[in-house]
Image (spheres, helix red, strand yellow):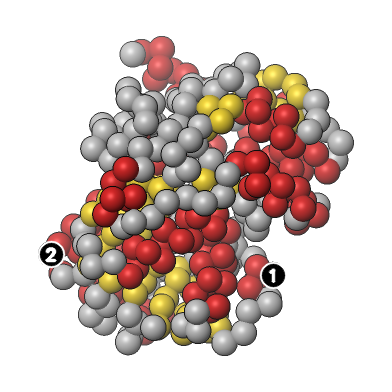
């Protein structure tokens, strides 16, 4: 099989590349290295890697010729920078997705897997949260990923592309982003652990998350690509929740509290009955094992920024400014 992966040098993408190459598939990777790293792919052979920006039209579109399936993973992630610069997120996550879909259309690609975000559920009214629950995007990142999903499903139906969208819940694991803006909890915590700093826990730490290990996400992507199902949305999660305080306990270290943030749910918890039934997929990596794998690879985060309460306060100023105002008005 011949696959094309956008964002293949990034966190999830590089793990997918590894899995598909192990199965002797042909792989083309498109990445602009805004968050991805060439180092993530340095040990892989028989790989065609192209540096390009899919939010801009260019010769990269020709790489879609004779592709059996596209995995569209490339996107700008994280909440804070999406509030600071929403236009940048729209261009990357919406325009970029549109360009990928047009490339699929032009070269008659029959299958595309889109990586969506569970952040589209906002603050859910029901747990575990199923795919048919209300959409309540709280910030531009969530909105742009959801718009990308809707574009993908629409293009799929109209232009005969078999599209599956996977709504990912709290993905963690090795090779996650180590630089740039304040973002995902595990990356923040691992850098703090290396620096001997306390973990910055939001609120009382009793909030729970459905953490999904990256190789489980990869297995869901592969299963979706092989499936004959089309134009469907599936949650991808561990099917369990764990508190932030428990994560601190597993990582080992002291903690310091920082203010609870508006627009964040107290719980994320995926209902994964649909993907278990229709795609015969289920997660395999329990949180305890996943955390051990991270600790074993902790040197990966040596160059990551170390976030202190003061730095986080500055970085999240717009978060409280805009989302706090919106919550007060409700």
Q: Residue furthest right?
A: 196
Q: In this view, does 180 lie above or below 189?
A: below
- Determine which of the numbered discs, if any, sits on residue 69 in the image: none
Side (left or right) of 81 relative to 180: left
In-image side of 36 versus 88 (left or right): right
Q: Which residue is drawn at 51% across and 32% down?
A: 241
Where 327 falls versus 15 (above or below)? Answer: above
Dot 1 and dot 2 residues touching (CB under 8 Å): no
Badge 1 local density, few (<14 within 10 Å), some, or many (20+)? few
Which residue: 46% across, 61% down?
A: 219
Report x, y in % for residue 187. 67, 44
Q: How crowded is mark 2: few (under 14 residues within 10 Å), some or many (20 or more)?
A: few
Residue 196 visible (yes or no):
yes
Percent position (x, y) of residue 262?
49, 21
177 lies above or below 226:
above
Q: In which quarter of the image is the C terminus?
A: top left
Q: Which residue position holds label 1?
A: 39
What residue is rendered at 53% in x and 71% in y?
A: 19
The front one of 311 and 185 is: 185
Q: Could you say whether the residue bearing mark 2 is in a helix, strand or loop?
A: helix
Q: Position of residue 162 (x, y in %)?
A: 23, 67
Residue at x-position 33% and y-position 86%: 65
Q: In this view, does 295 lie above or below 60?
A: above
Percent of width and height locating residue 286: 58, 44
CA–CA distance in space, label 1 to label 2: 39 Å
Query: Is residue 139 visible in the rendered structure shown here?
Result: no
Quadrant in the picture for residue 278: bottom left
The residue that mark 2 highlights is 158
Q: Nearer the viewer, residue 62 or 186?
A: 186
Mark 1 vs mark 2: which is more N-terminal?
1
Q: Please, what secondary structure does the residue beneath circle 1 have?
A: helix
């Amino acid at each position: 099989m011949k696959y094309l992966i956008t964002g293949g040098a990034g966190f999830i993408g590089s793990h997918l590349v590894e899995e598909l190459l192990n199965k002797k598939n042909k792989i083309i990777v498109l990445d602009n290295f805004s968050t991805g790293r060439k180092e993530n792919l340095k040990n892989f052979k028989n790989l065609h890697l192209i540096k390009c920006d899919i939010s801009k039209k260019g010769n990269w579109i020709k790489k879609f010729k004779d592709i059996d399936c596209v995995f569209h993973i490339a996107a700008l992630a994280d909440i804070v920078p999406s509030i600071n610069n929403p236009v940048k997120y729209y261009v990357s996550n919406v325009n970029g997705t549109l360009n990928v879909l047009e490339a699929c259309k032009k070269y008659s690609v029959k299958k595309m897997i889109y990586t969506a975000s569970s952040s589209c559920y906002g603050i859910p009214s029901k747990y575990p949260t199923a795919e048919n629950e209300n959409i309540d995007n709280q910030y531009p990142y969530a909105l742009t990923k959801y718009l990308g999903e809707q574009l993908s499903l629409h293009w799929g139906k109209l232009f005969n592309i078999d599209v599956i969208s996977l709504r990912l819940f709290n993905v963690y694991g090795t090779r996650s982003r180590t630089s740039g803006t304040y973002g995902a909890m595990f990356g923040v915590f691992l850098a703090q652990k290396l620096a001997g700093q306390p973990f910055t826990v939001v609120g009382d730490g009793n909030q729970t998350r459905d953490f999904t290990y990256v190789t489980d996400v990869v297995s869901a992507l592969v299963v979706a690509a092989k499936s004959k199902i089309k134009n469907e949305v599936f949650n991808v999660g561990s099917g369990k929740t764990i508190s932030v305080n428990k994560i601190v306990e597993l990582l080992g270290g002291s903690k310091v509290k920082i203010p609870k943030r508006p627009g964040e749910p107290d719980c994320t918890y995926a209902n994964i009955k649909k993907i278990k039934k229709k795609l015969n997929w289920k997660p395999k990596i329990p949180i305890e094992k996943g955390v051990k794998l991270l600790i074993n690879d902790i040197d990966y985060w040596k160059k990551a920024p170390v976030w202190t309460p003061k730095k986080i306060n500055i970085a999240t100023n717009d978060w409280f400014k805009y989302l706090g105002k919106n919550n007060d008005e409700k």
